[in-house]
Image (cartoon, rainbow, N blue to C red):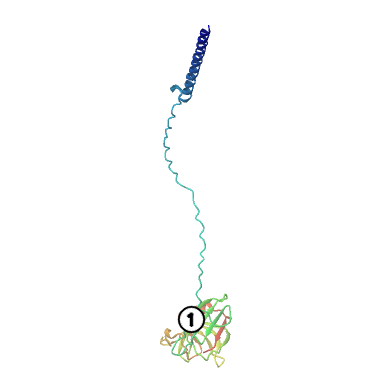
Amino acid sequence: MKLPRLLFSVTALLAVALVAGGIVGVISVNTSNATASESDPAPEQSTPATPSPVVTPSPVATPSPDTSVRTPAAAQPSTITITPSPTPKPKKPKPATRERKAKNIPEMPLDKNTGRRIVYDKSLMTLWVMNKKNEVVHRFPIVGRWDRPVMGEYKVFSKSERSGNPNSKVTFDHMTRFAYGNDGKTAIGFHSIPKYYDGEMMHSVDQLGLPIATGGCVRMAAEDAEKLYEWSKIGDLVVVLPSP
């Protein structure tokens, strides 16, 4: 009686073991399938590859011409320092002699007066005609003498378009008188180079600028004497500068 019960118990245990083993196998199979599903998705559920976008090149833009007016930048001042050259000193005038004309004759007369006047420089044998603005109207070479008239200030007192000297048998034109000789009677003035009665000139135009006169008058080229005659007025100031 004891052997059958033992066999029944063994059989029951085996049955229980078999049932338990089947359940474990099923669970194992299901777990394996679930893992495979999660790690290897079905083909129809896979994400398709995204195609690369087609890049169409943009047309090259043609630059429009620049019609705006550009103002050039202001030039920067130069920083170069220029030292001015010293002004050369004017050369000192050299008086005339009977054989040589004066040298370094200045543009302006050497008197201290201003305004309208006639300046006769006996040292330089030159005559200046000045207007009221103290500007040089004319400058003439002349022939005179050193001893007369004496230096000083005079006034134009008489004018003659034609004149002469019977003692010397000469004639001259455009006489502008401003002084008297040593006798107090013979007039001294500016006029053209005297001509003898035969038409010969007392001296040449080339000699103007030399102190070679024998009378007291001041001799000038014919056209210069005419210019002075037309410009001068009675009462004009005449300044006579000293001899050398």
> Which residue position holds label 1?
140
The vertical placement of 129 against 203, above or below, is: above
Give the image location of residue 214, x and y in percent: 48, 91
Residue at x 49% of width, y 20% of height: 28
Q: Amino acid at mark 1?
A: Phe
Q: Nearer the viewer, residue 42 or 33?
A: 33
Crowdedness near tag 1: few (<14), some (14–19) or many (≥20) residues, C-alpha within 10 Å: some
**Count of picture labels:** 1
Give the image location of residue 92, x and y in percent: 50, 84
Q: Nearer the viewer, residue 4 or 35?
A: 4
Give the image location of residue 173, x and y in percent: 48, 83
User: Residue reaching furthest bottom?
Assistant: 183
Q: Secondary structure at mark 1?
A: strand
Q: Nearer the viewer, residue 38 or 19?
A: 19
Q: Quadrant of residue 58?
A: top left
User: Residue reaching furthest top?
Assistant: 1
